[in-house]
Amino acid sequence: MKNDEAMLTFINNEMTRVPQTLNNKLTRKEKRFQCRKEFYKIKEFVDDFLEEDSLNRYLLLPGLRGVGKTTIIFQLYEYLIKEKNINQNQILYLSCEKLNEYFEFKILDVIETFLKYHHNSTISSLDTKIFLFIDEAQYDYNWALSGKIMYDDSNNIFMIFTGSPALNLEYNADSARRLLKRNITPLNFEQHLKLKYNYDSGNMSKSLINLIFNGDYDYAVECEKNIQSSIYNINGYDENEWDNYLMYGGFPISLYEKKYQNIVERLNAIMKKIINSDMNNIGNISLDSQVNAIRLLNYIALQQPGEISQNNIANYLDCSPSTIKNILDILEKTHLLFHTEAYGSSSKRLKKSWKYYFATSSLRHSLVSNLGNTMKDPSAYKGILLENLVASNFFNLYHTRNMNFGLFYDDNKKRNVDFIIQQDFNKPIPIEVGIGKKDKKQVKNAIKRYNSDYGIIISNKTSNIEKDDDIFYIPFRTFSFL
């Protein structure tokens, strides 16, 4: 009974607090936050639910800390109150991270308490439409089972669970048949401009996908011209906007912060929170492993892109290779890091070391900024960030567009390209990333070796998308709209 009372007190406090703080959470200096594209799709599901279409009412939004998942939820909360006239007692927002600070809990117990005292009902007897926004759901390992039970027992509950990418690991086939997953990834440059300036880039992203995967050149050129004729007319647009995005972007916190050191500190804080909290939820790792995880990230940040030997890292950190393997595995499950494997047969992919990249170039830059950049050539350092940008854009594309393709590195010893992508059984597409005067010998060589129809060079060699025989040139800024 005491626990019931404590839980009810927590629920009541949150139901009072959240509506009162919505304006502060959704504005900065009296400027309203723009909505991510994911908001509009979820809003469609909300509208369908209110119109008695109860199929898509169990949603999962996994994503890195700081990418804007909670903001999406608060925007939906406001939409329900102000535009749909939903009563506040029909909406419950819960931060499981905050709840975990007070007592041990199960999401299902919290919801049952909410329904009992605020609607005099149980889940199965509920006759009022209810909206549940469950933030940082990974703090309850049984969140998926709770969602399944509520989905099966009532058609009157619309629920969204958010949390770390580890949520992808915590639901079974039964839950998967019921829920819809929408990964919330770091912002590409298109989304950055949308949120900061409310700028609409049209079909630039779609045209780039068609160019890269299908060789559709003309449409991409047309979309790029439209952007170039309008982007500099954006009110308040900074001519250094893209360079700043490369080093500090990808997260909404960078949109309005003018002091770059503050952004660096916030990004480093996000990474430490992931290591100290999310990693432990996934793998229950020791304090020593958490310390080694931070050192490992620093080690990778300071390295030039290339194959990374787990044995070498183990020697550097003075721990076992199995510990390094476990740390890397968990870091990838958080999506803080991801890897590419060598292109080729399954045996080659097993034998060769992997290359690791950060979720955004800004995360890598924030670590380097704290450690002190030891590279003497600014151009070479920028090239490292650009390669990370290209890799992370492909990684995020894979996780948001349901496109089935592989991203690999070329392990050829001479004239190797940076990446190879392959979709289904189509021919591989070699991709070279470079800054400065990048020639086409490497891509030409890869086209011949892999019998590809064309190759791609992503660089600053051209200011526009260009085609030279069987090679497409894409400027970095244009590519970052992918």
Image (cartoon, rainbow, N blue to C red):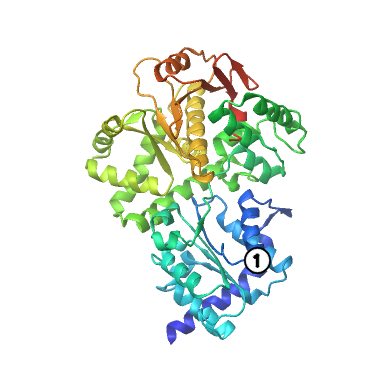
Q: Is residue 110 visible?
A: yes
The answer to whether residue 25 of the structure is visible from this angle is: no
Residue 354: quadrant of the picture:
top left
| Corner quadrant of residue 222 | top right
| Left or right of 462, for residue 303 | left
Looking at the picture, tell me which residue is in the foreground, 88 or 430: 430
In the image, residue 6 lies at what x, y percent?
A: 48, 81
Residue 164, given in percent of the width and then of the height, sits at: 45, 54
Q: Quadrant of the N terminus?
A: bottom left
- Residue with the most extreme front position: 425
Instruction: Tell me the amino acid under the disc marked 1.
Output: Thr
The one of 36 and 139 positioned closer to us in this rendering: 36
Classify mark 1: residues with Cα within 10 Å, few (<14), some (14-19) or many (20+).
few
Q: State whether residue 222 is above or below residue 166.
A: above
Q: Is residue 136 above or below residue 262?
A: below
| In this rendering, position of residue 169 left or right of residue 309 | right
Task: Identify the residue under disc 1.
Answer: 21
Looking at the image, which residue is at 31% across and 30% down?
Answer: 345
Q: Residue at x 35, y 41 (%)?
A: 295
Foreground residue, 25 or 449?
A: 449
Q: Secondary structure at mark 1?
A: helix
How many labels sit on residues?
1
In this view of the protein, which residue sits in the foreground, 24 or 439? Answer: 439
**Where does residue 74 sit, x and y in percent of width and height?**
62, 61
Residue 207 drawn at (x, y percent): 63, 33
